[in-house]
Amino acid sequence: MPAPSDDARQRRVQQRALETRDLLLRAAVDVLCDSGYAGFSTLAVGEAAGVSRGRLVHHFPTKNALIEAVTDHLARSYAELAPAQARELVAAPQPDRAAQGLGMIWQLMNTRDYQAFLELLIGTRHDPELRPVVREFERRLEHELLAAVRIVSGPAADSPEFGASLLTALQAMRGLLLISSAGGHDLAADWEAVRGRLLVLFRPTA
């Protein structure tokens, strides 16, 4: 049996490296969600991923490097997921496109990925090095969410007030999720109450 070529070995090495990197990034999201930013460290992520310290440091030599990679990973994930969900909704539109669009944004934000972002947002607010990194992810995320809901909303997105109403909705949803993370709140009930008020913003005025 012929020995594997150098190219084949190199491809296997590269594939294992990509798999390890992905495993570490997913573990980082889990640690942020389960332990918060206070419990987030490269050691905790390595243990959660079952990856040795040497392999972890090879990919992410510092905590800040890991956080930068996590935010980029989340942004890329949303860049794929948001438009895909929008296209699915457009393929099966409902009469109330505003409600459909708001529901889509809520589903995209009420996730562990977004929870991880909120932990980073809170935890790095006083960190001059990481704060711009997290803010850049926030900008990229808002861009993807706004673009997706415009697809779903159709002609209503041409309204001059549409963009401001969307930003208001995003801020309200973020506030709900932040409050819920402290515990003691019925998130589903809170969302239903706020959802009705947000929909008023998208109703045409006389």
Image (tube, rainbow, N blue to C red):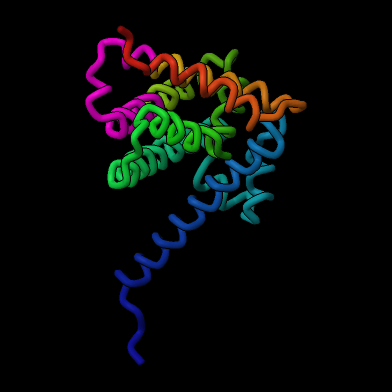
Which of 24 and 140 lies nearest the eye of the viewer? 140
Q: Residue at x 39, y 43 (%)?
A: 81
Q: Residue at x 43, y 36 (%)?
A: 104
Percent position (x, y) of residue 204? Answer: 32, 14
Q: Residue furthest bottom?
A: 1
Percent position (x, y) of residue 57? Answer: 56, 45
Percent position (x, y) of residue 55? Answer: 56, 52
Quadrant of the rendering where the N terminus is positioned:
bottom left
Residue 148 falls within the magenta-colored stretch: yes
Q: Which span of residues is magenta-colored? A: 141-165
Percent position (x, y) of residue 179? Answer: 66, 21
Viewed as shown, does residue 74 lie left or right of 179? Answer: left
Viewed as shown, does residue 64 lie left or right of 187? Answer: left
Q: How many marks?
A: 0
Q: Taken as a whole, is the magenta stretch helix, strand or loop?
A: helix
Residue 74 falls within the magenta-colored stretch: no
Q: Residue at x 71, y 33 (%)?
A: 39
